[in-house]
Amino acid sequence: MDNKNERKEEVSQVNTNNKEKTTESTPQSNNKPQVVNINSTNEVNQKVVDNNNSNQTNDNTVPTSAKIEENTTGKQKKGHPVFLVLLMIFLFAFVFFLPDITNFITDYMNKSTGANELKSGTMTCTFSNSTENINYNYDFSFKYEKNRLKSSRMTTTSRLADTATDNSILTEKNNSCEFLKTVLDENDIGMTADCSVSAAVQITTQNIDYEKLDMDFITDNITEFEGFYPEYELNQSVTTIEQELENSGYTCERNER
């Protein structure tokens, strides 16, 4: 009996040892099967694909923008000569039409301020002066349109202070006037002269049409025009002329229409 019991105990001990070995060899973890999330895998794959597409898009965009910039730069360079030509044409036209532009601005300013400088008519300025032997009288007459000078007449009267005075001075003045008259009659330059002399008075009249006046001829023959050189020019402001003459002692009056 004892032997049987011993055998049973040995068998039981062997079984127990086998169980312990089995338990030790088996990892202590959940035996549940692991589940892989298919959606998360697809999302990862999709992100990889999107990143690749983004990189491809950027690779394609850079050369395209560079080409556009190159084309734009090329067009600008080609446009430079055209711009310069247009600028030169504009500057030439501006200089050529500068007098008309000036008149337009002046007329506009006069209209805005209500000034009378837009009127046309004549202005007469007179001045008297005396020396020991001769009394001088200067009579200026100006014709203008919208305050712009068009023509003038200057009459200089030299009168002996004493009729007993030698009139040789008047004779010299008249000879100078006659010489000028001859030059002007031979050359149509927009200027004429008339002369007269008597025992006590000599008169010189100088007429100028500024629209026809040839200043080049006068400059080339300056000797003949000593004492008769034109002081004013076409379209000069009559108001400016009036101020200058009045500052020199002249008295000016306007007859406007």
Image (tube, rainbow, N blue to C red):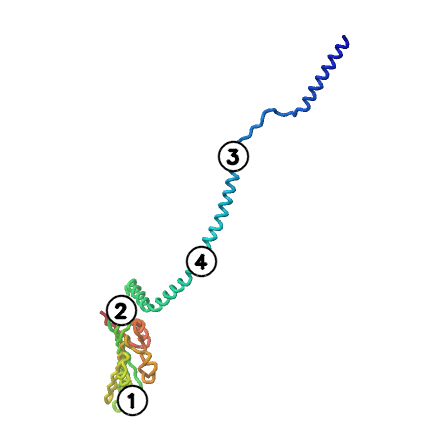
Q: Earlier in the sequence, mark 4 or mark 2?
A: 4
The answer to whether residue 162 is left or right of residue 25 is left
From the image, tell me which residue sits under label 3: 42
Dot 2: element: loop
Residue pushed farthest right? 2
Residue sitting at the far top:
1
Q: Amino acid at mark 2?
A: Lys
Circle 4 sits on which residue? 74
Badge 3 or badge 2: first in the primary sequence: 3
The relative height of residue 121 versus residue 164 in the rendered view (above or below) is above
Say what secondary structure mark 1 lies in.
helix
The answer to which of 184 and 8 lies nearer the viewer is: 8
Residue 14 sits in quarter: top right
* Res 198 quadrant in image: bottom left
Q: Residue under circle 2?
A: 146
Amino acid type shown at disc 1? Glu
